């Protein structure tokens, strides 16, 4: 039975995250409903990452298995015709039976966007975190570099969680400023529940001078969520890309 890989882009504003939930709209539900509309078959769809409510994606990957004589182009056109306007299939690929959207992934790139100016945003309000106080970019960058490597990220994991392994290998952390806009990128083999948003909330406290730049090492060692800062809001977070071997 063929395994079908989808690369998805979506605006998560109106959705309660990726994972199907009772009585709430989710991305997974919308994709599964679209597949049913095409095939009249109920098929479970697996996502590479379970993005939270309000989080967006530029390159989420999902997979499902279904024996249907359709080309990737036909799948793309049919799915986009059935999906709501907030969700689009960017590409479809036919994969080997061994492919699994989540288990086959070797790395994910996330980006968090901050608008750093006194005036609130009008157009970008659902796609960034507005911080009106000036931020010390260099201090935030220095703090974030302490996270590089294979480490226990328990201090940045929101509870409750069904994840028993808190070790993640953060391979890249970068902070870019373009005028009044900050883009913070994280690339790792995996991420814990709300890990990036917890890190960004902590980095913001560094940028505001509420924590020293060298405090993140001690936060990691504490292995306790209460040692870190608040969780950043979801609308600034984007799943940019999922990589496979």
Image (cartoon, grey):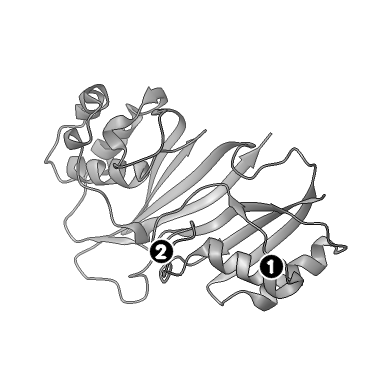
Q: Which residue is mark 2?
A: 16
Q: Secondary structure at mark 1?
A: helix
**Near-viewer residue (33 or 216):** 33
* Label pair 2/1, CB-CB below 8 angstroms: no
Badge number at residue 165: none
Q: From this view, report whether residue 175 is shown above or below residue 59.
A: above
Q: Residues within 10 Å of mark 2 (few under 14, many from 20)?
A: some
Which of the 4 quarters of the picture holds residue 80? Answer: bottom right
In the picture, measured across the screen, residue 216 lies left or right of residue 43, that is left
Q: From this view, report whether residue 178 is shown above or below residue 204.
A: below
**Near-viewer residue (26 or 141):** 26
Q: From this view, report whether residue 139 is shown above or below residue 69.
A: above
Q: From this view, report whether residue 103 is shown above or below residue 101.
A: above
In the picture, measured across the screen, residue 143 lies left or right of residue 54, that is left
Q: Secondary structure at mark 2?
A: loop
Badge number at residue 35: 1
First along the sequence among labels 2 and 1? 2
**Residue for point 36% across, 69% down:** 126
Which of the 4 quarters of the picture holds residue 107? Answer: top right
Q: Measuring from the top left, give residue 11's x and y in whole percent.
A: 48, 67
In the picture, measured across the screen, residue 175 lies left or right of residue 64, that is left
**Residue for point 42% across, 59% down:** 55
Q: Measuring from the top left, give residue 26's x and y in whole percent.
A: 48, 65
Q: Measuring from the top left, give residue 129's x and y in whole percent.
A: 29, 60
| CA separation in Å, label 2 and label 1 | 20 Å
Task: Name the outermost residue toward the left.
Answer: 210
């Amino acid at each position: 039975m063929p395994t079908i890989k989808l690369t998805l882009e979506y605006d998560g504003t109106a959705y309660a995250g990726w994972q199907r939930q009772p009585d709430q709209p989710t991305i997974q539900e919308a994709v599964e409903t679209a597949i049913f509309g095409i095939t009249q078959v109920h098929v479970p769809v697996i996502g590479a990452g379970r993005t939270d409510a309000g989080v967006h994606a530029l390159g989420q990957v999902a997979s499902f298995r279904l024996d249907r004589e359709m080309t990737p182009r036909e799948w793309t056109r049919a799915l986009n015709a059935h999906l709501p306007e907030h969700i689009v299939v960017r590409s479809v690929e036919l994969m080997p039976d061994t492919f699994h959207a989540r288990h086959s992934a070797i790395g994910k790139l996330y980006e968090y966007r901050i608008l750093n100016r006194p005036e609130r945003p009008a157009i970008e309000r659902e796609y960034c975190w507005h911080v009106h106080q000036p931020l010390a970019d260099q201090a935030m960058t220095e703090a974030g570099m302490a996270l590089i490597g294979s480490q226990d990220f328990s201090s940045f994991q929101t509870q409750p969680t069904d994840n028993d392994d808190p070790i993640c290998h953060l391979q890249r952390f970068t902070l870019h400023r373009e005028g009044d806009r900050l883009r913070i990128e994280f690339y790792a083999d995996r991420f814990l529940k709300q890990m990036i948003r917890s890190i960004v909330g902590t980095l913001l406290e560094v940028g505001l001078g509420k924590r020293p730049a060298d405090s993140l090492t001690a936060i990691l060692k504490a292995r306790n969520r209460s040692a870190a800062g608040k969780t950043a809001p979801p609308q600034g977070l984007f799943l940019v890309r999922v990589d496979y071997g």
